Amino acid sequence: MNTLLDSNILIYSLNKGSQYYGKATKVLSSGKGFCIAEQNIVETYRVITSDKQFTDQVYTPSKAWKQLNIITKNVPVLFKYETTVEILQDLVLRYKLVSYQIYDASLVALMLENGVSEIYTHNDKDFRRFKEIKVTNPFK
């Protein structure tokens, strides 16, 4: 469990109309030691139940949870500790982060707290600033 999957990987794997669907499902089924964060579950739910962002096949709450439960049965979920906030504070101050950048920093703090060294994401540019982790974009 050395690699965290970002929310976009989960979202693409649930959107058959996405150009990234095939690669995202391949990543999920690869058997590599992936994990996700509680934050990824929340972010994925928000997108797949939004008719503004998920226009092809908006999920109902029950269908969304059914799909998320399938994912979490196969991919361990990391939760924050009290000390994760201290790591987050250090990252925010070190990199002078503001506004929405806090969400990426929160994932990185959780990764560092749990000894996870790599993130798979389509938004690789958002995570490149963090020298503490390896960033992989499986769609390139």
Image: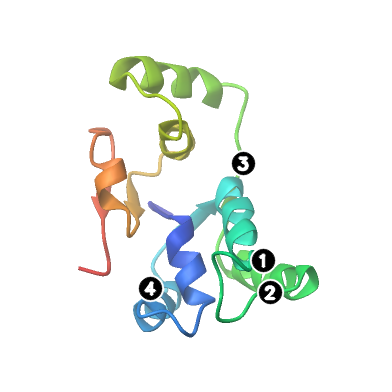
Q: Is residue 81 left or right of residue 15?
A: right
Q: Is residue 79 above or below residue 4?
A: above
Q: Which mark is residue 59?
A: 2
The numbered disc on residue 49 is 1
Label 3 sits on a secondary structure element that is: loop
Name the residue nearer the viewer: 57 or 67: 57
Horizontal and vertical percent for residue 129? 24, 34
Disc nearer the start of the sequence (1/2):
1
Pointers 3 and 4 in contact (C-beta within 8 Å): no
Q: Amino acid at mark 4?
A: Val
In percent of width and height, residue 26 lies at 38, 80
Looking at the image, residue 135 sits to the left or right of residue 14; the answer is left
User: Is 136 placed left or right of 4 in the picture?
Assistant: left
Residue 39 percent location from the top left of the image: 58, 46
Disc 1 + disc 2, Cβ < 8 Å: yes
Q: Nearer the viewer, mark 1 or mark 4?
A: 1
Amino acid found under the numbered disc labelled 1: Thr
Nearer-N-terminus badge (3/2): 2
Q: CA distance from mark 3 to mark 2?
A: 25 Å
Instruction: Using the image, tell me which numbered label, if any, was put on residue 79.
Output: 3
Residue at (23% x, 41% y) in the render: 128
Q: Which mark is residue 27?
A: 4
**Distance Cα–Cα, label 4 vs label 2:** 22 Å
Q: Secondary structure at mark 2?
A: loop
Three-letter amino acid code at disc 2? Tyr
Q: CA distance from mark 3 to mark 1?
A: 23 Å
Q: Secondary structure at mark 4?
A: helix
Q: CA distance from mark 3 to mark 4?
A: 22 Å
